[in-house]
Image (cartoon, rainbow, N blue to C red):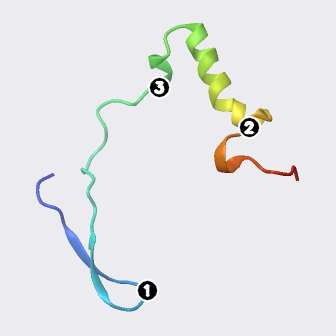
């Protein structure tokens, strides 16, 4: 990657500021990231789905997501 490339842009006040340019490497990845392959057993896959989907399909909410009164 080496040195970073900065671009001159205007902020909301109209002043010129330095903004970080593109930092990605050109080209395509060597291999795809298959997250499902990391979950080897059936139980691990079910556990992942239970954890990931509980926010959509249950009444279990945390932190700022929790409403004091239901809509």
* Element under disc 2: helix
User: Where on the picture, by quarter, is residue 9?
Assistant: bottom left
Q: Residue at x 27, y 53 (%)?
A: 24
Q: Residue furthest front?
A: 68
* Mark nearer the viewer, 2 or 3: 2
| Mark-to-mark CA distance, 2 and 1 | 37 Å
Q: Please tell me which residue lies in front, 19 or 23.
A: 19
Q: Is residue 61 left or right of residue 24?
A: right
Is the residue 62 above or below the residue 40 in the image?
below
Q: Could you tell me how far apart the alpha carbons at marks 2 and 3 are, in whole angstroms?
A: 21 Å
- Closer to the chain start, of discs 2 and 3, is 3
Q: Is residue 48 left or right of residue 34?
A: right
Q: Going by the image, does 37 lie left or right of 71?
A: left
Residue at x 49% of width, y 10% of height: 40
The local secondary structure at tag 3 comes to: helix
Q: Which residue is mark 3?
A: 35
- Label 3: few (<14), some (14–19) or many (≥20) C-alpha neighbours in 10 Å: few
Give the mark, 2 or 1, whose residue is nearer the N terminus. 1
Along the viewing direction, whichever of 22 and 49 lies nearer the viewer: 49
Q: Which mark is residue 12?
A: 1
Q: Nearer the viewer, mark 1 or mark 3?
A: 1
Tag 2–tag 1 contact (CB < 8 Å): no
Residue 35 position (above or below residue 40): below
Image x and y of residue 69, in percent: 86, 51
| Residue 21, percent from left and from top | 27, 66
Query: Which picture quadrant has residue 59?
Result: top right
Which residue is identified by label 2?
Answer: 56
């Amino acid at each position: 990657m080496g040195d970073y490339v900065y671009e001159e842009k205007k902020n909301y006040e109209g002043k010129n500021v330095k903004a970080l340019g593109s930092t990605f490497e050109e080209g395509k990845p060597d291999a795809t990231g298959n997250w499902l392959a990391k979950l080897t057993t059936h139980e691990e896959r079910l556990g992942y789905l239970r954890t990931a989907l509980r926010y959509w399909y249950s009444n279990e909410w945390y932190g700022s997501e929790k409403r004091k009164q239901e809509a």
